[in-house]
Structure formats: C-alpha cells, structure tokens
Image (cartoon, helix red, strand yellow):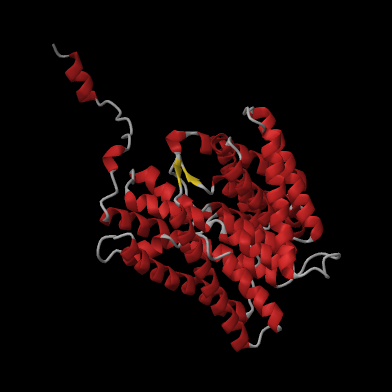
Amino acid sequence: MTATSLLLGLLLLSYVGSILAGNRTIRGFGLPSGAEYLLLGFVLGSHVLGLMNRSLVGSFEPILIVGAAWLALVAGVSFPRVGERRVRLPRALGGVVLSALIGAGVAGGVYLVLTALGQFAVLERWLFAAAAGAVSCESTRHALRWVVERHGASGPLSNAIADLARASSLVPPAALSVLFAVMPAAGLESVSIGARVGITLGIGGLLGLVATLLLGREFRRDESWGILLGTSLLGMGVSERLGLSAVATSFMMGLTVALVSQHRTELKAMIAPTERPVMLPMTVLAGAFVEVDPATFMRWVLAVAIFGRLALELLRGLLLSFVLKAPRGSWVVLGLGMASTGPLSVGCAVAIAARFPDTLGPSALVIAAAGVLAGELVGPLSLRRALERAHEINEDSLIPPPVRPSLDDANRRSMP
C-alpha cells in the first residue's frame, strides 16, 4: 500500500464517518469507544496483514497529532455542557477529582511494578507511570450516549453519569501538559516545569481569547470555521515547536472559548459533528501504530493497568452509589459501567507515542488500546444494567422499526 492510497482510504473513511455521525436513523450502532476501528488498524498493520507497514504509518504522524489535538479541542468546547444542559460545578469538580484519583492509582501501581522489576531509572519510571495513568483515567461519554440512543435511557442517574464522564475529559490533557513539560524541546531547559505547564495552558487560553474576539457579536458559520481552524492550528504548531503538549493547548483553547464566548452553544453544535469523522481515521492509524511488546515487564504493567483500573472503578461505583442514591447492590455495575475509555484516551496515547518514540510512547499506546478493549467488554453492558436497576431504561421511547406488511394484512385491507 502506498501513502497516496492510504490517504485516499482515510479520507473515504472520514467521509463515511461524517455520514454516520449526521444520520440519526443509524445512531447508536457500532461500538461507543471505536474499538472496531482500532482492531481494523491493527489487522491492516505490520503484525497481521502487513498492508500498512511501520514506515508508512510513521509518515502520517503529523496527521495523528493534529487529529488528537482536534479531539481535545472538541472536548474542551463541549466540556461545560451535556446537550443543552449545563454541567453543575459540584459534579464537574467531582468528576475531575475521581478521574484524577483513578489515574493516580494506576500510575502508582505501574510505578511499583517497574520498581519491583528493576526497570528504568527513577525519572523514566515516573514518566512511564504518568503516561499509563493519563491514558487510563477517562470515562468516555460515548458509552452513555450509546445506551441512551439504543435503549432510551433518561433520568437523574443518567444525567449524573453523563456529567461525571464529561468532566473526566479534563484530566488526560492536564496530565499531558505536565508529562510533556518534564522533557521539552531545546530552549526551555532553563524554565521550571511549572512554568512550562503554564506556557502550555497559557497558549491555549490566549488563543481562545483571540478566537472569541475574532468571532465578534454576530455568529457567522463560515467565518467561525476559519477562525477556529486558524487559531487551533497555530496553537498546535507553537506547542509542537516548543516540545509541549498540543493536546493540552487545544483543550485549553476550546475550554476558554466555551467559557468566554457568547456563541458557545452555536460553536459546540458546529464542531461536535466533526469528532467522529476525525476519530475514525485517527483510530485506524493508531491501531496500525500499536507494537506488540514481548517484554516480560509489559505483561505485568498491562495487568496492573487494566485490573487496577477496574478495581478502582469498583471503588468509584461504591462511592457513587451512596452519593447518587443508586439502587441497592448496583455499585458493581455502576463502577464497571464507567470503565469505558474512548477516542480522547487513544489520542493522548498517540501524542505520547509521537513525543517519546522509544519505549515509553509505544507502551502507552499498548496500554491505551488494551484499556479501550477491556472497557468495551464490561462498560456498556454494565452501564445498561445499572440504569435498568434505576428504572431509567425506557425501551418504549424509541421509535420501533417499520414492519413490513404481510400477505394477511393485505388481504384484510382488501376485505369490505
């Protein structure tokens, strides 16, 4: 396969994804995390069919970085709201804190395993552990949306889970802002790590304010596209040039626009449909980018990252069952229902793999891919059971599929 044919295939996949995202009649189909496209990329990659070799996929690395940063921008613009409803501050803070604790727990477990196995120096262990926590702490909102659109779920528990999942999207970009600040590009060595993080977020915040000023008072869709694309690409380029996180910069820019601009609702409605068309080709490339590491220490790291995450999710489910007054005994399915990770985690892993191409980056991508698959196995089904126990599944609210008329029906209509 040549680079041209791969590019055409990715553009076709993106076009099909835009149709799928815009067609309400087929929403709710497919896997909420996009795991099928991750597996498709892995099958097409060098480990199975060999249609996309490592050097070919590596030539598309800038597209991967831009795609990951754009997903972060969409998450930032969408952060304060779920649909037309504004996320309440206590739930937003609770979602951020719980997600950060899960990421810290996974990072701590990975660090202890690496220490016990004698792998890497101390700084490399911390970086490795931080990367594992960053790609393991998100609870994708797509899992709840999948249940809502397939089973008509609605109610207080559904709203609370949606708010917590939306708030969790802040933690991975924030973690990447610190991770990338530890080892920046040449020219920032004399600047402290805290200042580097401030520069990362400051670039995003400044460009968010610039975009808000350029948008003006009257919303014009065509001009708004040009402003968002121009300012976001500028932020991505500056961050990459400085060796900082383009994902964190883009998320901060989107969050600033969402908090400051008076056109936040129109902007969210405008760019939200672009998430899936960007996610599909990026996920396929990420799947082809995955390297199967036979090293013994990675087996232990994967086990701790996956099962440690599930154990921490059970603790979160136990806490939420008391706070949200969920039905008795539903804490297990409630916790596992929030274990699904999604495209933002894959995008963060892709950015880490591009920034740290040795052992750290590919390992983070493997952990993210394994986390997506594990969350897909337990997340949506557990979430549906939790909402069923809360009596928030309403199958009757969905439009039933059309029934093809039978011969008996035609005979009845013909009778006087």
Residue 354 visible somewhere in the drawing: yes
Depth order, front residue of 37/393 = 393
Give coordinates of residue 176: x percent, y percent. Answer: 65, 63
Give coordinates of residue 106: x percent, y percent. Answer: 53, 73
Numbered label tally = 0
Q: Is residue 204 above or below residue 331?
A: above
Give coordinates of residue 205: x percent, y percent. Answer: 68, 50
Depth order, front residue of 310/50 = 310
Residue placed farthest to the left in the image? 416
Residue placed farthest to the right in the image? 187
Residue at horizontal 48 percent and vertical 59 percent from the top: 93
- Horizontally, residue 353 falls left or right of residue 279, namely right
Residue 2 visible somewhere in the drawing: no
Residue at horizontal 63 percent and vertical 47 percent from the top: 256
Depth order, front residue of 163/275 = 163
Q: Quadrant of the C terminus?
A: top left
Q: Is residue 156 above or below residue 93?
A: above
Q: Is residue 58 above or below residue 262?
A: below
Residue 115 occupies which quadrant of the picture?
bottom right
Residue at horizontal 62 percent and vertical 71 percent from the top: 130
- Horizontally, residue 73 falls left or right of residue 148, namely right
Residue 233 occupies which quadrant of the picture?
top right
Give coordinates of residue 42: x percent, y percent. Answer: 61, 58
- Horizontally, residue 267 falls left or right of residue 356, namely left
Residue placed farthest to the top in the image? 416
Residue at horizontal 67 percent and vertical 33 percent from the top: 215
